Image (tube, rainbow, N blue to C red):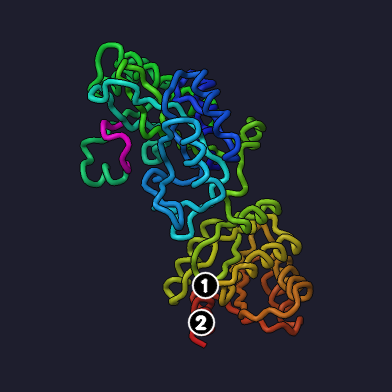
């Protein structure tokens, strides 16, 4: 689960990570008062106004219909309010949002950390994430902070510093210091960065994150190290330990269909294609999506109904797929292991009856437990459903219906 920058900074601060302080507001009317409060708390002169959306590249993004971007500098509380008005309620487009962009519902008013001696200021990239190839966590860092780290990795891979953490021992003090040394720091700045990395790793472990990324981690002119931005992905499988973190979810940042699917325990991800998929099991879902592409179509979604799917669950999934106006055909591909094929068939039939007329063709492939019974249920329903036995046959039927 993604969270906003301001939420991530609040979590990091609890673990001792030094942050760029700020106050989040959801109305331009609150900006002047909040800016004055921030000045009193931090002594900052100018105020950084930052759009809060689940996407990177905000500083280079553009507010639709304007020349404004997602990160601006207010030279006074009143100026900050004017900048906030350009963001709040409007759509910000960045390289990560796609052309549709995202609506800005909140802005973060943050302290200006460029307070003196710009020649002494440095920006770094620091992150903690899981290296699946090595089966352990890794600290990644670079002197080229404030830039797209993917571009840095591609153009100058030697600029990426990596330090792997033994899962039994955890982060050792010398490892944090080793990364700080590799970043070219010394003296007070070296000690600050070492402490910063230790605290960052503690936060990563403490909140069960799958990724904590600080870009940039900022060395001020007086050698303090601050998290000026934060990108945190939380592992929602650990929310049974973190009820408070589950409450950080911002559904307005998610696809309405994905939110609806999660309410019924369905694993749904909306894509940009034209063929809706309903499958049980992530591996089978990926194989099904590949077959759709080979047949000349594009998957419109990833939908895993899970092993314990009932007729009601299948109907809910069916309804969600049909709400996507781009869907021109639906492929239901079920292997009956835990879930029974007759349950799925009943779900399809009930969905047909309850939804009414369905204009898109439906291809159903059932294999495994009670597959024959499921096929008989669909056959006896009188519905306009195309049956298939093997996956390639199902893909060929998709190709045929798309061509018509």
Please, is residue 342 above or below residue 397 in the view?
above
Q: How far from the left and from the top, in percent, is residue 182?
A: 24, 24
As helix, strand or loop, the secondary structure at mark 1 comes to loop
Q: Are marks 1 and 2 in contact (CB under 8 Å)?
A: yes
Q: Residue at x 35, y 16 (%)?
A: 192
The reply to whether residue 168 is in sight is no
Image quadrant of residue 164? top left
Q: Residue at x 67, y 63 (%)?
A: 317
Q: What secondary structure is marked by label 2?
A: helix
Residue at x 31% of width, y 40% of height: 147
* Outermost residue, bottom side: 404
Asked whether 193 or 390 is in front, the reply is 193
Q: Nearer the viewer, residue 71 or 292?
A: 71
Q: Is residue 102 above or below residue 350?
A: above
> What residue is disc 1 on?
274
Q: Is residue 92 magenta?
A: no
Find residue 176 and name its label: none
Q: Nearer the viewer, residue 283 or 55?
A: 55
Residue that badge 2 annotates: 402
Q: Residues within 10 Å of mark 2 (few under 14, many from 20)?
A: some
Instruction: Check the image and report above or below for 128 versus 149.
Output: above
Report the magenta residues as a range. 139-149
């Amino acid at each position: 689960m993604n969270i906003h920058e301001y939420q991530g900074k609040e979590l990091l601060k609890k673990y001792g990570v030094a942050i760029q302080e700020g106050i989040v507001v959801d109305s331009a009317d609150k900006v002047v008062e909040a800016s004055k409060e921030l000045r009193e708390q931090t002594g900052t002169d100018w105020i950084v106004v930052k759009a809060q959306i689940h996407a990177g590249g905000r500083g280079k993004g553009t507010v639709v219909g304007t020349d404004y971007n997602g990160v601006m500098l207010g030279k006074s509380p009143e100026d900050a309010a004017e900048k906030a008005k350009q963001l709040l309620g409007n759509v910000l487009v960045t390289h990560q949002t796609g052309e549709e962009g995202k609506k800005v519902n909140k802005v973060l008013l943050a302290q200006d950390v460029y307070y003196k001696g710009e020649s002494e200021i440095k920006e770094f990239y620091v992150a903690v994430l899981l290296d699946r190839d090595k089966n352990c966590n890794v600290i990644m860092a670079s002197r080229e902070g404030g830039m797209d780290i993917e571009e840095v990795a591609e153009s100058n891979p030697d600029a990426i510093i990596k330090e792997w953490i033994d899962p039994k021992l955890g982060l050792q003090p010398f490892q944090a210091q080793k990364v700080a040394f590799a970043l070219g720091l010394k003296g007070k700045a070296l000690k600050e960065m070492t402490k910063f990395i230790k605290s960052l790793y503690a936060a990563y472990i403490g909140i069960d994150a799958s990724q904590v990324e600080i870009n940039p981690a900022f060395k001020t002119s007086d050698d303090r190290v601050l998290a000026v931005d934060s990108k945190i992905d939380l592992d929602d499988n650990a929310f049974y330990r973190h009820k408070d973190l589950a409450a950080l979810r911002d559904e307005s940042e998610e696809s309405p269909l994905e939110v609806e699917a999660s309410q019924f325990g369905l694993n749904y991800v909306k894509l940009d294609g034209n063929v809706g998929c309903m499958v049980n099991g992530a591996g089978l879902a990926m194989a099904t999506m590949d077959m759709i592409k080979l047949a000349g179509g594009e998957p419109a979604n990833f939908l895993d109904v899970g092993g314990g799917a009932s007729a009601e669950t299948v109907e809910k999934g069916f309804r969600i797929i049909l709400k996507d106006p781009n869907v021109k055909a639906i492929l239901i591909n079920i292997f009956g292991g835990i879930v029974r094929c007759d349950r799925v068939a009943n779900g399809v039939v009930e969905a047909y009856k309850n939804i009414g007329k369905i204009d898109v063709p439906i291809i159903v492939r059932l294999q495994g437990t009670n597959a024959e019974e499921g096929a008989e249920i669909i056959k006896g329903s009188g519905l306009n459903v195309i049956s298939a036995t093997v996956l390639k046959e199902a893909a060929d039927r998709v190709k045929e219906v798309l061509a018509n």
